Image: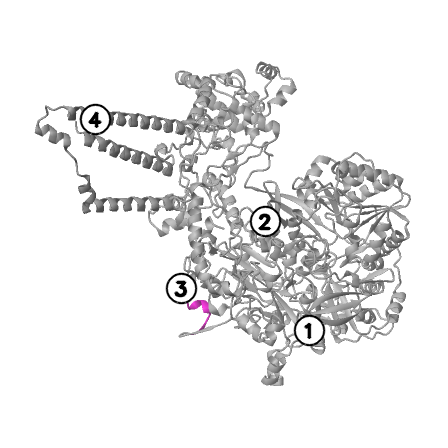
Amino acid sequence: MNSIRLRTLPHFFLALFLTFASVGRASAQDVGAAPAVSKEGVVPGAAAQAAPAAAAGTTTGDPAAIAAGDALFKGNCAQCHAINEVVVGPALKDVHKRRPISWLIPWIKNSSKMVASGDEYAVKIYNQYQKQQMPSFALTDAEITSIVSYIAAESEKPSQVTAGGATAGNAGQVDGQEAGGAGVGTGAGQYVDLLLIVLVVVLIVLVVTLVIIANIMGDVLKGRKDLDGRDIELLDQKFDFSKIYKSNVVRGLAVGLFVLVVLYESVQGVMAIGLDQGYQPTQPIAFSHKLHAGENQINCAYCHTSVYKSKSANIPSANICMNCHSQIKTESPEIKKIYRAIERKQPIQWVRVHNLPDLAYFNHSQHTQVGGIECQTCHGPIQNMEVVYQYSPLTMGWCINCHREQPLNTKGNGYYDNLVKLHDAANQGAAFTVSSNGGTECSKCHY
Amino acid sequence: MQESPKYWKGIEELENSPEFAKNAFSEFADFLPVSEKNSSTDATVSPRRDFLKLMGFSLAAATLASCEAPIHKAIPYLNKPEEVDPGIANFYASTYFNGSDYNSVLVKTREGRPIKLEGNPESLITRGGLSARAQASVLSLYDSARLQYFTIKGQQADKDRVDQEIRSKLVATGGKIAIVSPTIISPSTKRAIAEFASRYPTTEHVMYDAQSQSALIQANGGVLPSFDFSKANVIVSLGADFLGTWISPVEHAHQYITNRKVSSDKRTMSRHFQFEPNLSLTGSNADIRVPLKPSEMGQATLALYNEVVGGGAASSFNNAQLKKAAAELKANRGRSLVVAGSNDVAIQTLVAAINQSLGNIGATIDTANPSMVRQGDDTRMIRLVNEMNAGSVGAVIFYHANPVYDHPLAAKVKSGIAKVPLSISFNDRLDETGSLCYYAAPDHHYLESWNDYEPKRGSLSLAQPTISPLFATRQAQDSLLTWAGNPQSYYNFLRANWRSILGGNFQQGWDKAVHDGVAAGSLSPAPLAPVATAVDTNQAISAIARAPKAGGIEFSLYEKVGIGNGFEANNPWLQELPDPISKATWGNYIAVPRDMAVANEWEQGDVLKVTANGTSIELPVLIQPGQAKGSVSIAVGYGRELAGKVGSKVGANAYPLATVRGNALQYSGTATLEKTGAKSPIAQTQTHHTVMDRKPVVQESTLAQYIKNPKEVTEYDKVATPDGLEKPNKVSLWQDYEYKNHHWGMVIDLNSCIGCGACVIGCQVENNIAVVGKQEVINRREMHWLRIDRYYSSDTTKEDFAEKGKLDTYDAMEEPSENPSVIFEPMLCQHCNHAPCETVCPVLATTHSSEGLNQMTYNRCVGTRYCANNCPYKVRRFNWFSYYTNEKFEAVNGHMFTDLGRMVLNPDVTVRARGVMEKCSFCVQRIQLAKLEAKKERRRPVDGEVVTACAQSCPTQAIVFGDLRDPNSRVSQVTRREDGERGFHVLDAINVQPNITYLTKIRNVEPGKKLTV
């Protein structure tokens, strides 16, 4: 009907759409996976810390011992054992009824020795499970007792156990799906791009079609002689764009808006230099933290062995992968990459996600072992990450803020006893934060 | 009353030359070129425009660069060794011995690579101390000049082919097979050589030392006695630099200081007389030092013999101090010690007789458990050189020996090698000797090897590999065993050898020995019956009496504490370690006494041609107070031709000046000196960081004064207040800090510091300090965080004012002393509680911590250098260049350029960028680590856990570091005990309240009297 309007407006809309689309994409790139981060929050305690076993020699049932056993079980045993299902090793339900604890302790400490000594049951188990040796564990008697207490407690929970067992049992299947999913996941970015392109094409086709229809309609109408004045006026109506174009108010607004947007973007851009929050590189092997840490509840420290004792948390070496993957999912193409690395004696070159500048000194053990901070506090919901991304900004401001707010983990630590007294005497009620103990001084991190 | 001598740091300061005065008042040298190519128009006109251009460009570059962050790889182990955790240092016990001083060490490794050496406290010989040379040896491991493969005629060759050819040639050889090495103290290596000799019976193993002690060995019945300076109340040294380079300096330093440390509970110390031509490290620590010409040494020994034993021929040497020394020796029979550094068997025989007569054998001298660290035999080496030239040697193997460089008969060695059909080198590089050999089978570095050592009979020591071999080298012992047809590896060979002493549960004993690094027991063959001394006392006396009087200028050769015999000349840390006395780096020089320089119109830096013994070398002059009149001295160890990028062509080789006299190497003689007209500046650090000319920065007193009243040995500054004179810290502009947690502090005992420089290198290794090279040292831009200030003091005392009148005394002060006494003062950031640097920093890059540290934040520093300008101690260092990328520094600082060299860097310490200030951090990384370990174990840190690198390496424990908040820490105890007695702060009056307390030096001399001659 309104041909001119129809002729110009589509272009305008198209341009507007394209602009928004590109700006949208650009900002998505800037902030990286910020929307994906979704501040879903931290799940404290999801990766249980290995607590010292409180259990006594042979008794079971003490909740503290069970809790300690739970942590130890997840840290040491859960890779190969479940309560109700056979994983690599046998299901451990009622193991305390099958074998006495006096048998279990030497078995867990050094199973091969027991097999070699010709213990009947040991040899039977060994043969039954494809002569797969259980590694030796340097656990104390009390720790083993607490693990067994935990198993005993778990064995008595029938309903919950089946559910849990089902998940554990399906682990293999889930694993397969997830591995496939992981492949899709890495291509998710491309998929969105494709969708966008298709949408744009459809839109263009739509607009062109509309324009053509409008033109044809106009031509048809113009050819008709029976139109009255009003119709003709309507048909010949021209919108004077030059008026808007020449209006100082509009011009001023547009320029102002433009300048503001540019300023905002450039300030954001400059502030973000060297900031890699959301950085999510593709790794050479599609390792899923979601699967290992999330679904299988493997303790972080099982693979990141030195996170409680060293500056570095330690990227696990291939031999740690082999603890389980010499048995599990040996046919997976991703795991074959590990085998290949071992055969070729070429270490796996992971892409480093968290990069602190060389001028900053960071020590994991200071924060985990001494500070009692959960991994997720800085690394985010790692147990939900298919592919790891940088959750925290890792800026100095971020560090300092935490040091200002975080109370020191002084409980039971003889290092702080006197300091706490001094602090409490001087500042009634104020929290004894990291910074009040000098935790924001330069040479705590820069030397 | 304390004596108030005038101190000066060098001749320039004493003379107060205009140039010195100008430099003394400016922290930074003016108009020193930073850009090399400054065509005068550009450099002067357009720096501002260049700056703007550069700024624009770098902003653009930074924006571009930030678009895509570089990908960092995290590469884990394939199969992680159980004991290695990334980020955690492992320590392994090992042993350093390269033919001179022995050190038991702990090797600090990170991720499997050695990064630092520390002293092994388990060792009963070195007791946790470590020499500068041993500290620096970790860098030699990563030396890119090492030979990285086997060679034939200098060309890379297959190992098996080399083995095959050598074996067939060894079998076919007609003449003698000689293995030439410096002293080898490894019993198992000797056994491997014996194994080789049993396969090739014509083998002879010849040991020689670049600084030979064969006369000392000959004079003591074929053994090198062990000395115990801790039991001696009177020490007389005739030219033996036993604290610096003689036999076992780290061990001696510890013993020596044991009897020199004083406190109000122990007000006794030994008295030390030193008679020597050049001012050595030992001489500078002596209570009484007498300079004498090298040719007078024999007569002086004879005179001492006459005084102590009596009955010798009359001596021409008449000296009051010598008589005094003799009297004190006689008063301390069995509690005294006489040592001589000479390689003249007559002198050593007389010294042995003196010690015998004083009853020192068995008391301060142990011949039953002799030292093994010098076994070289000059006679056999000279015979071998002649045999090589005569053509009777069929094969020669050089095992870390470099006689073409360091033997006086170098020319004959060179011609001899050409005449030997089969020549093999085990040397770690194609050095002067190795490059002449047909085959080279380079040995591992000692940090890559298994080995054992017996530095002293009954004391064993082990070395274990701390890194896989970096290059395609092979341990020399393995090469010998392979060629001998023994399929055993040297490791198994070594273990088999140790079975005899470990007994019982071998594996347990072995594990303990490897863990401790040291073990008791002996693996050396049973001692032979003492051989008769080469000359008896009467022969020695007549030999000395007969010795011709030397005419003209005499010279003596000496080793420097850093470079030593030149084996590690390619080590830039050692090249840049200032000589303790002259503070010269990068090269040797002719040390001449002042009057000789004045008489001949030589100035410092004038190049002279020294001719002696038919050869001549050219070196610059350095005016050295304390150098004996009529003599000059020159350091050996420089002038290497084929050491590598760092060490080649630095200085001149002085070994050819040595002579062979009576089948012994002699390191002195007469020389002619002539001026060449050329000038060559000497890179001294001496006057660069002059402390303000205020009240004394160093304090000293006498033992007599100390015994009388310990509270009067130190002079404390007072300031005038409305309430009268008060301590400076009573008046202050600033708020005091409250230290709740820790308060780190240090005490440096000037009485224990011998100035050896171990701490300087220890600090350099720990803190990734750059090496800057000769020209930049001349430009006064060296980077050492810790320096040792050396002050000469004149003998003028306050009493002189009364005796001679003021004017004459001031006149006398301006006369340079012929023989000054010396004080060493380690100077590092004082971590002032009221730090002047902190208040002037415009960007708060240097701030105070709640633990008393003066923190330096590199990433905040913008390089205004205000702080350095405002520092009264001149301990701040500015990075004028990017020492790790600027190609100008690639030769000297090469270890920061290559991946190989960077392996030595401490990963916990930032490598500083260009344009930032740096300084001593009190090893904050070590403090933080020790605190963390304590926190992890839920306890307070124990005193002694937190140790700085300098305190750790000090062989005399002159530096004590700890927590002043802990009342039981050693540092608090000493500070409390010495407060008001010996403890003082440098420049106390300016009230910056340093966290470092110094303790006044006490000399065992009579007060107020001039004891020096």
Q: How far across and down, in percent of the image, does residue A175 sit?
A: 46, 21
Question: Are the numbered discs 3 and 2 placed on the same chain, yes or no?
Answer: yes
Provide the residue designation for mark 4: A214
- Say if residue B739 shows up in the picture: no
Dot 1 lies on which element? loop
Q: Residue at left 42%, top 62%?
A: B839
Question: Are the numbered discs 2 and 4 placed on the same chain, yes or no?
Answer: no
Dot 4 lies on which element? helix
Q: Say above or below: B406 vs A80.
A: below
Mark pair 2, 4: CA separation: 72 Å
Q: How far across and down, in percent of the image, does residue A205 sit?
A: 29, 25
Q: Nearer the viewer, mark 2 or mark 1?
A: 2
* Front residue (pair B742, B7): B7
Callouts 3 and 4 close, C-beta under 8 Å: no
Q: Nearer the viewer, mark 1 or mark 3?
A: 1
Provide the residue designation for mark 2: B897
* Chain bearing mark 3: B
Q: Which mark is residue B819?
A: 1
Mark pair 3, 2: CA separation: 44 Å
Callouts 2 and 1 close, C-beta under 8 Å: no
* Chain bearing mark 1: B
Which sits earlier in the primary sequence, circle 3 or circle 2? 3
- Residue B228, by quadrant, is bottom right
Dot 3 lies on which element? loop
Callouts 4 and 1 close, C-beta under 8 Å: no
Amino acid type at circle 3 is Trp
- Say if residue A14 shows up in the picture: yes
Q: Residue at left 59%, top 79%?
A: B798
| Number of residues whose C-alpha sits closer than 10 Å to that of mark 1, classed few (under 14), some (14–19) or many (20 or more) | many
